[in-house]
Amino acid sequence: MPNEFKGEPIAAKGAKFAIVVARYNESITSKLLAGAQSTLLAAGVADADIDVAWVPGAFELPLVAQTMAHRRQYRAVLCLGAVIRGETTHDQHINRAVSLGLSQISLETGIPVLFGVLTCESLEQAIHRSGGQVGNKGVECATAALELVDLLDRMLPLEF
Ligand code: INI
């Protein structure tokens, strides 16, 4: 039988979490934030162990996520935003930079950096994914963060 490692979405004792959230499309991102916070709290994370930083738009998420990750106080950094396609290719540039930037920070620091950014064709799609018919990306992001922290804790003894 191989050894299997599987994390659970439970709060590690005393674990602190950072949430970086974009103000652009705030009617959507505030719902992602509420979803992420309530998921962390429901899992047993203390209110005082959640720090929230607001940035102007999704493009600014990587810099602040990197700053949070480098503090080495947080077990995970959750990044929330809503990019909605307009008449130009602006959204594509933002999405590419943010997705790449966040994954690079995660690999560089070894801290889970979660991609809770909606990349939608329309406001309707974003509404559906921020607590509507298609779930809440903030909840998904927080659940994934909890699972990853638990998984890394289970794997820690394997580090050399
Ligand atoms: N920022 C978003 O978070 N979502 C968007 O849909 C968006 N659009 O479409 O323009 C957006 N633009 C702002 C961008 O993230 C930066 O804040 C801005 O370009 C300054 O760097």
Image: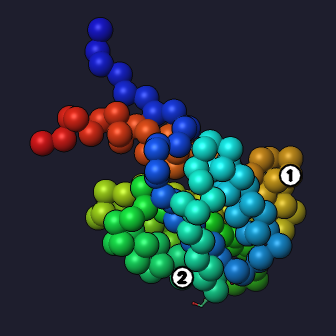
Task: State the residue lying farthest toward the left.
Answer: 160
**Left or right of residue 48, residue 1 in this image:** left
Nearest to the observer: residue 104 or residue 64: 64
Residue matched to label 1: 132
Secondary structure type for disc 2? helix
User: As shown in the figure, which amino acid type bears the numbered disc 1?
Assistant: Gly
Is 42 placed above or below 56 here?
above
Residue 90 in percent (x, y) is at 63, 83
| Residue at the disc numbered 2 | 60
Residue at image location 46% in from the left, 33% down from the top? 7
For label 1, the crowd category at 10 Å Cα-Cα, with few meaning under 14, some 14 to 19 and many 20 or more, is few
Q: How far apart are marks 1 and 2 (CA)?
A: 26 Å
Q: Residue at x 45, y 80 (%)?
A: 63
Residue sitting at x 60%, y 44%: 44
Residue 121 point in image, percent of width and height: 76, 66
Answer yes or no: disc 2 within 8 Å of ligand 1. Answer: yes
